[in-house]
Image (cartoon, helix red, strand yellow):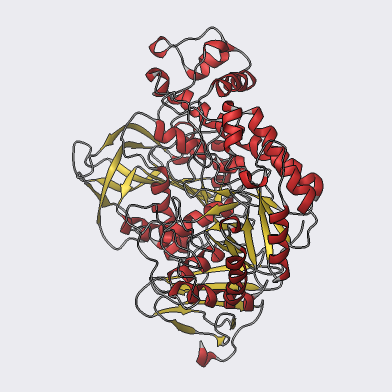
Amino acid sequence: MKKADRIYFGGDYNPDQWDDKTIDEDMTLFQKAGINLLTLPVFSWAKLEPDEGVYEFEWLDRIINKIWSHGMFVCLATPTAAQPAWLSIRYPEVLPVDRAGRKRTHGMRVYYCVNSLKYRERAAAIAEEMAKRYANHPGLAMWHVSNEYGTYCYCPVCQAKFRLWLRRRYGSIGELNIRWHTAFWGRTVTSFEEITLPTELNDDYRFNPAVQLDYMRFVTDSTQECFLNEYKVLKQYNPEIPIQTNMSGYIKKLDQFQLTKQMDIAGWDNYPGPEDPPYFVAMKHDLIRGLKGGQSFVLTEQSPNQQNWQPYNRLKRPGEVRRLSYQAMAHGADTCLFFQMRQSVAGQEKFHGAVISHSGRDDTRVFRECARLGKELDAIGDVFLEGRIVSRVGILFDWNNWWALELSSGPSKDMDYLKTVSLYYEPLYRQNIPVDFLPYDAVFDGYDLILAPMAYMMKSGLSKRLEAFVKAGGTLITTVMSGMADENDRCLFGAYPGELKDVLGIWVEETDALRPWEKNCMEIRQGYFLSRRQYQCGFLCDIIHAHQDTEVVAEYMEDFYAGLPCITRHNFGKGQAYYIGTQPEQGFLDELLEGICKEIGIQPVYRSSSQVEVTCRVLETQATVFMINHGSSEGWVDLETDILCGLTDPKRMTGTISIDPGDVLVARKKPGEQNTDSALK
């Protein structure tokens, strides 16, 4: 596979919107900004194929050669996210049907049925024309298939394919009736042909989580087929060029573990909201890194300034885009790419931020910040590319679990899987403890701590592997709403948390759902690294019965279940398993996880002040340390006796160093380099 020899810096460029004079100006500005890669032609299908089988590539030939002559690479995108009008009108079956049963008309991007055979035929054809022409171009760095998959369709083709998918999955209609528990509300079917899609046209199906869950799985599989339809064509012409696609920042729609299995590299678009704290953004990067087993990923898009599609589009503050860019690289990105390079004249995103604004000047704040970043990345070179993050902590994450949990009717409408996971990620982030996100079928070797927040769905073999992990000396933390259902969202009989009862040493009788303004209190029965005796809790409250050999960490203080356990710890084999049967206040989780990590010997990369994030990416011969101050005051990092050589600031670092407000330091560390002068420690 072709490997990068630099951090690719640049992003989406749309030269078909500009005249030659503007394009020439752009080339000069790109060089000033240190841009070394441009992604194109993402939405140019109509210009490349103005009529069926009629191709006009000469304009793209000129642009690619011009880019290459200016010392920049290209990430070539198949333009299949925006089919031409002739395709939609001549073959209306390519257009999707929405959940309300309405056939959509031409106009939107990413507005096609992924199961349309005609769409796939024409998408493969345009991909092949591009591959024939450019697969061996020296300037081609990678392929980018389509754009932000995620369209759900409910057309007759999807209905027919869904029935075939179900037949393959379950084998017989009898087995499907059992798995979907269709006896409830009398929804038994006697033929696969009687199955309809979960739409607004049939409220019974709309609110049947088992059907919706399988349809979401089906859409993921269909989207993967659609991606592979182009991937296989591109690979035929040059198997050495890596292929990826950009996942939308709204990652819930598709099972990304499944979708990325046959991609060469994962890529995603990072558009944090103005209220998203740094730990939440970091968590998403770590989740994307986890999709390919810890392999580095492509940051395919971010905005160099404000977005335009949020309710209130705040400007990125001075230094913010630099921090966000380095944060992505600190958590596994090998690229720093933007949408967009030049601000569009018109259209839905004409006010979306860009490296080159409508002014076309090189003295704007945004351009100067991007140019500074480009200069730094050029100086860093390939020092951390493909570097891995070494972690002894894993967080289990599963899209099927996410969907089933939030499709469930009860116990609370405020069920939020991603938010709950973030509550357990945040204390580790604040301690600068690296975290790997793991699929439910992961191997736990090498991990000392596994967290499984809201492990609602018990997939085959998961409970046995968790038991073996704890029995061998590992520490497990799981929570309320765990061990409750199987892969078809059927409740597990025999008391919750189902197959996890033995390892946790408890059983749950009931779960109370508190309203947002209601709280309970927890009283700590044992010390457990905690500074206080009492903490607040809320959202959900399990009524727990602890086995005789299970320690009660905390009890409820209020309501009819006052005095009953809410948090427990159970020794199992050589390890221990914690159950957190409510949603404690964040201060409790901070202290508990800090204490557990210390107890089992998990250390931070380096200690730092509260607003400073520290990560480390490791290669065989060296490590790269990222230090990012997200705060508005000076921070510090304690490097102890290690000696680091600055990359963004070329100086020797050791001991406790300071970092300016909003600043970023990137430094190289070689194995065995330590300071022998105790006065500098």
Mark count = 0
Q: Quadrant of residue 20?
A: bottom right
Q: In x, y percent, where is residue 9?
A: 60, 67
Q: Give whichever of 371, 605 is nearer the camera.
A: 371
Against 624, residue 552 (above or below) is above
Q: Residue at x 47, y 9 (%)?
A: 188
Q: Give whichever of 588, 146 is nearer the camera.
A: 146
Q: Residue at x 57, y 60 (%)?
A: 18
Q: Is residue 518 visible?
A: yes
Q: Is residue 487 visible?
A: no
Q: Give whichever of 461, 13 is nearer the camera.
A: 13
Q: Quadrant of residue 161?
A: top right
Q: In x, y percent, where is residue 313?
A: 35, 58
Q: Quadrant of residue 624?
A: bottom right
Q: In x, y percent, where is residue 227?
A: 65, 40
Q: In x, y percent, where is residue 305?
A: 43, 65
Q: Give whichever of 626, 82 is nearer the camera.
A: 82
